[in-house]
Image (cartoon, rainbow, N blue to C red):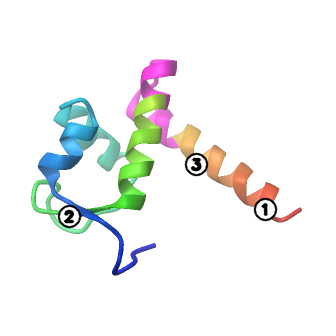
Amino acid sequence: MHDEHDIQLSYREIIRACDHDADWLLRIIEADVISISGAPEAATYSGYQLARIRRAHRISRDFEASAPATALILQLLDELDTLRKGQ
């Protein structure tokens, strides 16, 4: 899902997108909502990852979901999207 024309964001920029909640972002990364290589602080983040993080943030906030529950909800939504595209 990496495109050479995709935006690249720093850790600091991603934290701003998460309402400055670094602990939440680290829990989301640990729950495999997004995949990164290396340390979160040194990684660069794509536009796709930013969109996924924002979606996770809304789910987490709206449903008061833990990081693992948020990851599960996203996985189920992804599967639903896949099923809908197959019709």
- Above or below 81: residue 1: below
Seen as rendered, the residue at the extreme bottom is: 4
Question: In terms of secondary structure, where does tag 1 sit?
Answer: helix
Q: What mark, if any, has residue 44 been given in the picture?
A: 2
- Above or below 53: residue 86: below
Q: Which sits earlier in the primary sequence, circle 2 or circle 1?
A: 2
Q: 69 and 62: which one is in front?
A: 62
Name the residue beneath numbered marker 3. Answer: 75
Label 1 vs label 3, nearer the camera: 1
Identify the residue shown where x is 17% and y is 66%: 38
Q: Which sits earlier in the primary sequence, circle 1 or circle 3?
A: 3
- Left/right placement of residue 33 relative to residue 77 reads left
Binning the other alpha carbons within 10 Å of mark 3 as few (below 14), some (14 to 19) or many (20 upward) gives few
Identify the residue shown where x is 20% and y is 38%: 16
Binning the other alpha carbons within 10 Å of mark 1 as few (below 14), some (14 to 19) or many (20 upward) gives few
Image location (x, y in percent) of residue 22: 17, 36
Question: In terms of secondary structure, where does tag 2 sit?
Answer: loop
* Amino acid type at image mark 2: Thr
Image location (x, y in percent) of residue 20: 18, 32
Structural distance between the alpha carbons of marks 1 and 3: 15 Å
- Above or below 60: residue 53: below
Q: Quadrant of residue 49?
A: bottom left
Residue stretch in magenta? 59-71
Q: Quadrant of residue 45?
A: bottom left
Structural distance between the alpha carbons of marks 2 and 1: 30 Å
Question: In terms of secondary structure, where does tag 3 sit?
Answer: helix
Which quadrant is home to the C terminus? bottom right
Q: In the rendered structure, does residue 63 fall within the stretch colored magenta? A: yes
Q: What mark, if any, has residue 85 been given in the picture?
A: 1
